[in-house]
């Protein structure tokens, strides 16, 4: 006698087989090229296994997806480190995707889980093969150098960040604000801007920190736009690293000190004395966190003049991008992109410029109160206190004038 549940059982099997058949569909292929690396993103219908390996003469990266199907045969043109992308089914039913390269690379891949914007994604990151990492040169203890302001536009590339009700993407507006801030800092006597990204590509969080360190940054600011379900919420907020986040990073630094030969100001972790190394890192982080809070307080006060401040005090969180132990760092949530009015303002170049001016004013106030020795700001601050005049560099628009913070 047949079981009455059998039809349901076979229906479930059929549905499962159908899901399995489409589980390896590659719906879209996207490339994001930055000055430092190239990222390939395969939009998938579901989670899949894959195999990745490299071939030489010529240089290639090969990705095999079991039982894979390419839904769109037209693949994007090569860019960055990729000359072209090819794909074809193999005899065993796997889908093979080949990245023809411009040179030798290091390749790594990972499967990204679905989010509010995308489904499953297979991400392949390519970085050029280099013989050795550059050695960081420390600032001279004396001189007349400019302060370096590292400006970090959040998200980018396949990471759009928050998306407003009318489709505005966080990655786009924060890059516009970061560029406006770069222009404002470039006009400021005694300061030099540096962008961690200057295009629509993603930079890993630790890479953003490394970029700031390689430029010997005196201050790091990450620009974002907040989002929340309640669309009525508005306002700016500023974050610095929490004590717990600093503690986590200190442990990582000490565990990997063979990969971090130096930090700042000649402080080295080459010593075999773990207690001494721990003390050195703690001293660096305590000084950096104090400076971060002070600078962030100045910025928050200036943002309060531009619009509504959501949180009247500087907040603390464990954001990875803030974990540089020697660079004062902050994260600025410029506005709520989830609020229709603030979303509209965030797209306005005039409002972007106002935000940039406010952030710069915060930097200026902090550095004139705490001028680093051997900098032009230190000279300008001393002249300001004495009522004197400092002659700027030749060609400087502020020549023979005193900067007024």
Image (cartoon, rainbow, N blue to C red):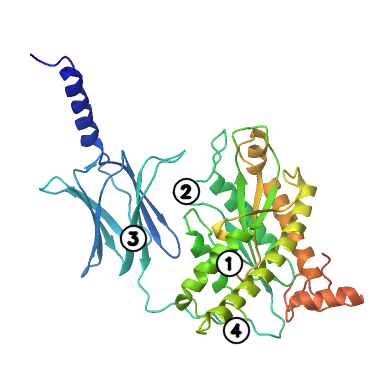
Question: Nearer the observer, disc 2 or disc 4?
Answer: 4
**Marks 3/1: CA–CA distance:** 24 Å
Q: Which residue is mark 4?
A: 266
Q: Which residue is mark 1?
A: 324
> In the figure, 336 relative to 382: above or below?
above
Question: Nearer the observer, disc 2 or disc 3?
Answer: 3
Residue 27, how many percent across, how many down? Answer: 31, 40
**Marks 1/4: CA–CA distance:** 16 Å
Q: Which residue is mark 2?
A: 159
Residue 282, how many percent across, how many down? Answer: 62, 72
**Marks 2/3: CA–CA distance:** 18 Å
Is 39 on the left or on the right of 50, as rendered? right
Q: Secondary structure at mark 1?
A: loop
**Which callout, 1 or 4, points at the residue further toward the start of the chain?**
4
**Marks 2/4: CA–CA distance:** 36 Å
Q: Which residue is mark 3?
A: 108
Q: Secondary structure at mark 4?
A: loop
Question: Nearer the observer, disc 3 or disc 4?
Answer: 4
Q: Are marks 3 and 1 in contact (CB under 8 Å)?
A: no
Residue sitting at 67 percent across and 38 percent down?
342
Q: Quadrant of residue 23?
A: top left
**Marks 1/2: CA–CA distance:** 22 Å
Q: Are marks 1 and 2 in contact (CB under 8 Å)?
A: no
Residue sitting at 69 percent across and 71 percent down?
287
> In the figure, 169 relative to 110: above or below?
above
């Amino acid at each position: 006698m047949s079981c009455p549940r059998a039809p349901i059982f076979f229906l479930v099997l059929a549905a499962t087989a159908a899901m399995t058949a489409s589980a390896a569909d590659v719906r879209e292929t996207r490339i994001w090229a930055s000055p430092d690396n190239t990222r390939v993103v395969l939009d998938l219908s579901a989670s899949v296994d894959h195999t990745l390996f490299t071939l030489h003469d010529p240089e290639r990266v090969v990705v095999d997806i079991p039982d894979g199907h390419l839904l769109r045969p037209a693949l994007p043109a090569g860019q960055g480190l990729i000359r072209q992308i090819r794909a074809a089914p193999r005899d065993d039913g796997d889908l093979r995707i080949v990245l023809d390269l411009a040179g030798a690379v290091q390749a790594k891949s990972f499967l990204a889980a679905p989010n509010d914007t995308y489904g499953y994604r297979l991400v392949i990151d390519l970085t050029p093969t280099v013989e050795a990492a550059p050695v960081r040169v420390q600032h001279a203890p004396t001189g007349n150098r400019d302060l370096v302001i590292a400006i970090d536009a959040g998200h980018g590339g396949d990471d759009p960040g928050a998306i407003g009700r009318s489709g505005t993407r966080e990655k786009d507006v924060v890059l516009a604000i970061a560029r406006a801030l770069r222009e404002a800092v470039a006009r400021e006597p005694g300061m030099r801007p540096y962008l961690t990204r200057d295009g629509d590509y993603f930079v890993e969080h630790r890479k953003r920190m490394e970029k700031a360190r390689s430029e010997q940054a005196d201050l790091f600011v990450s620009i974002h736009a907040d989002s929340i379900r309640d669309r009525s919420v508005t306002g700016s907020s500023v974050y610095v690293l929490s004590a717990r986040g600093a503690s986590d990073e200190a442990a990582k630094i000490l565990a990997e000190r063979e990969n971090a030969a130096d930090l700042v100001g000649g402080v080295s972790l080459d010593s075999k004395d773990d207690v001494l190394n721990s003390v050195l890192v703690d001293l660096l982080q305590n000084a950096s966190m104090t400076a971060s809070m002070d600078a962030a307080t100045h910025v928050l006060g200036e943002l309060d003049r531009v619009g509504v401040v959501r949180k009247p005090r500087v907040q603390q969180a464990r954001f990875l991008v803030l974990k540089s132990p020697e660079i004062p760092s902050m994260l600025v949530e410029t506005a709520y992109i989830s609020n229709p009015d603030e979303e509209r303002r965030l797209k306005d170049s005039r409002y972007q410029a106002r935000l940039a001016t406010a952030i710069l004013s915060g930097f200026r106030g902090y550095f004139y109160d705490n001028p680093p020795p051997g900098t032009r700001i230190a000279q300008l601050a001393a002249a300001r206190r004495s009522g004197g005049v400092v002659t700027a560099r030749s060609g400087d628009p502020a020549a023979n004038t005193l900067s007024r913070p």
